[in-house]
Image: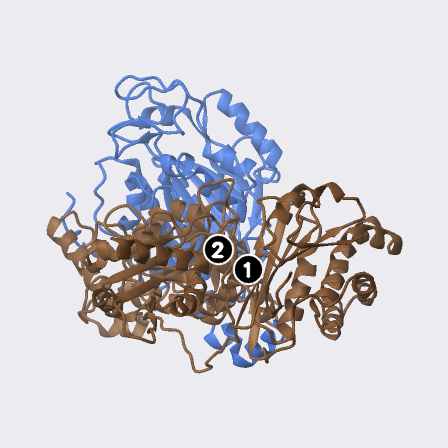
Amino acid sequence: MSENRVNDFVLKIGTVNGTGSASANGLLLKALFRMGIPVTGKNLFPSNIQGLPTWYGIRVNHKGYMARSKRVDVMVALNAQTYQKDMDNVSPGGFLIYDSTWPRERQLSRTDITILGVPLAKLCNENFSDARVRILMKNIAYVGVLAALLDIDTVILHSLIEETFASKPKLVESNLKAINLGFNYAKENFTCPLPIRAETMGDNSKHIMIDGNSAAGLGCVYAGATVGAWYPITPSTGLMDAFKAYCKMFRIDEETGKKNYVIIQAEDELAAAGTVLGANWVGARAFTPTSGPGISLMSEFIGFAYYTEIPSVFFNVQRVGPSTGMPTRTQQCDIMLCAYASHGDTQHPLLFPANPYECFEMAVSAFDLSERLQTPVFVLSDLDIGMNDWMIPELKWDDNYRPDRGKVLSSEDVDNLEKFYRYLDVDGDGIAARTLPGENPKGAYFVRGSGHNKHGMYTESSEEYKDLVDRLLVKWDTARTLVPKPVFIPAEEETSIGIVAYGSSDGAVLEALDNLRDQGIHADYMRVRAFPFNEEVTHFVEQHETIFVVEQNRDAQLRSLLILETNTDARKLIPVLHYSGMPIPSACVVEGICEHLCAKDVA
Amino acid sequence: MSFIKKPRVDFPGQLSNEIGLLKRDYEGVLSTLCAGCGHDSITAAIVQAFWELSIAPENVIKLSGIGCSSKTPAYFLSGAHGFNSVHGRMPSVAIGAHSGNRDLVCIGVSGDGDSLSIGFGQFGHAVRRNLNMLYIIENNGVYGLTKGQFSAAADKGSKSKKGDVNQWKNIDAVSTAISMGSSFVARSFSGDREQLVTLIKAGIMHPGCAILDVVSPCVTFNNHAGSTKSYTYTRDHYHPASQTDFIPPANEIKVSYAEGTSTVVELHDGSRLLLKKADSGYDATDRSRVMRYLEQQRAQGEVVTGLLYINAELPEMHRIYRTSETPMKDVEFEKLNPGSDALAKLQARMR
């Protein structure tokens, strides 16, 4: 009945929020990773602290596909509330594991899957006395069951437990005991391993497992950011948590115990934005992590920073908006919001990391770009990248790197000038030199919104205002040449079909490309990595007759930007959209493209 | 008025301060406020105070929000960087600026609309963090630039120029700041230059968030009969609760004072504030008594002025946070960046 699926399956675990399943799931993920198999972990969790259902999906794929798959090959259903639904979701030929401490016969209604009962609660109740420990160990026990069923290397599991609890030997003992309870039960009662199983594969030693928020927070540390201001909001919170943790590791002076960083948990996002502007104005690298609703609140300051040309870095870890209900679901829904955030004529550079590796890299380049261009720069991550566990190549650092502080005049530079004019474009690139407070009275200027002229003086003159906003367009063209270029994957055969995607949609497109090729559909792929669009983007759009724009929002926001900013024919840009709040699977891309092409053939 | 370049006036006998600067070195561009505006008197007092303290203008940052009051930083210390931010958000910019460079002397100028309505939250949180700055609220009880609406500081029963009577209770910056745990709260009147200069000096030197509420009549929209923020009303109800002398670190206290009638508060840098009590029993270091006193005087319709509350021991933001003495903007990149070896080591734990 079941096909053999070695290193190609999806494991899903359904538990109750707040029962400690995260560490068990992490253990499974890392064990598979250490077996050298490409693996990703995606958390589907409620906006809740304790009591609601939560799922963790692990995709194991020898080809390295990272996107969410809609398949469920092995389901561990530990939440009575969702038991029926969890069973319904198992793909035909798959396996369902449940806690048989309580009888569930009446619910065992599927014949096309294999149902395996393990009395997890009973086993743990018999072997552990403390109530809380019993709940926690039930999770570790299912890791043992899965180790037997999926042939997960137990030596690796044991060493992982020893490493995790190195400072608490008692916990090593109880965790190992729980693993063995599950493992032995499965070995004694089922045919192990299942046809769906893992097998030691390649070498993952040049890879790491990390989430995008941690990588971005680490990037801020490496970029030399010293001031972080924020207001807690899911799913961006992990970014500041990471910045804080790495600062504690690397930024506390050993002699004095004093901090080489300042983290301000502001009273709201407006204050967080103001703090970021204030710090950058005096010459410190400062940033804020937030999500869509936060950007809405920050918008007044964002426009102010655009006009007054104050560097500032905004991380938007996108989620479904607004407000309650779906804040723990992913989307790419703030593209338009960030591109033109604020009142008046405003436009902002955006960076689109596709994975935690790029979160690290782009965190650093965001500061460089922002200081070079003296303008707000957005890093548009999302919940899927930010909060899920990704396998990425190990991060590299070039010790010769030095921050690009842009055009900042020193006190001596100012002395050598006849007069300092804050907004005078001397070089023709639209960027004027700035000075920092605290250095030279001759370099002092007054920051104020739109009413200033090129000399930095107050004005209400129409000509002087136009002069200023037109110069900002020159700067925008400079930005176009500085932002990261797109990544191209050309088709094996010449084709007039193009696919455009960005950010976390990348994985689904990469997988879809193989699938489409097998069906005889060849497409060139361009992953856009930044806004404003550089000439490579415009060229790609011009060169293809049909372009599928894949994104995770309802309104085809990148497509809109392409229409607005490249003068392309809107009719040739075909939207392929996924906006359920779940990460986009490759099937969505394949179906979207095939449907369009078939419809065209019929016509 | 607005586009005239301010002439530099030289006259014989001008005094230099300790760093060789004249008072005009502390001035800014020509004010564009209405003739007779209380805010201009405050600007003049700020110029005087900074000059007397011999603070180099380039070491100062001056910030503001939006409104008539928030225009004034352009009118003093042209050698200091200025930041005319968005409405009600001056404190957050100040927090950022001070996070990035703690060596800067920070003065924020706000108004009653800017701090007690749109920016009430930020005002509260600057106090809560005890951000090391002088925070002046130029309080005229009215929105001037939008032509005469009541502000949250307008007293209940106060009459607008058009004849409307304010129905709402006012928010009092002084008692609010004290109840929020402020370390320095003072009130003054733009018409009392001597008191104002002393309080500005004390506020600048105070190592924490010094809130200075200054009643500053709006000659155009709030200086009529029936207004409780007019020159006439304020003069009639003016009641100094304490008189303050600021004594720089080097100077001995030479002023004689009767035992039990004065308090000396020592600031972080060794300078001292000598508080002479106008009312017997008034103690600016006793929070609960201060609150009771203010309530009593309020009931009598008095505008109590002076340094009303001080606690010089409350640590300011960076002391609480244990920030490096070196301003963040000056910390060498080598100290900020952990390098490639550390990155490799860190990643060993991610496998």
Please give the name of the residue rendered at 55% of the width and 60% of the height, measured from the top-left corner: A388
The location of residue A83, given as percent across then percent down, is 67, 45
Find residue B190 and report its horizontal and vertical position in percent. Answer: 35, 37
- Chain hosting mark 2: A
**Looking at the rendering, which quadrant does residue A255 occupy?**
bottom right
Q: Amino acid at mark 1?
A: Asn
Please state which of residues B152 and A263 is positioned toward the viewer in this rendering: A263
Q: Which residue is mark 1?
A: A388
**Local SS, label 1:** loop
Look at the image and give the colour of chain B.
blue
Q: Residue at 22% x, 36% y: name it.
A: B34
A276 versus B333 height, above or below: above
Left or right of A230? Residue B13 is left
Is residue A275 among what the camera can see? Answer: yes
Q: Which residue is mark 2?
A: A583
Eyeballing the image, is A132 above or below B20? Answer: above
Amino acid type at image mark 2: Pro
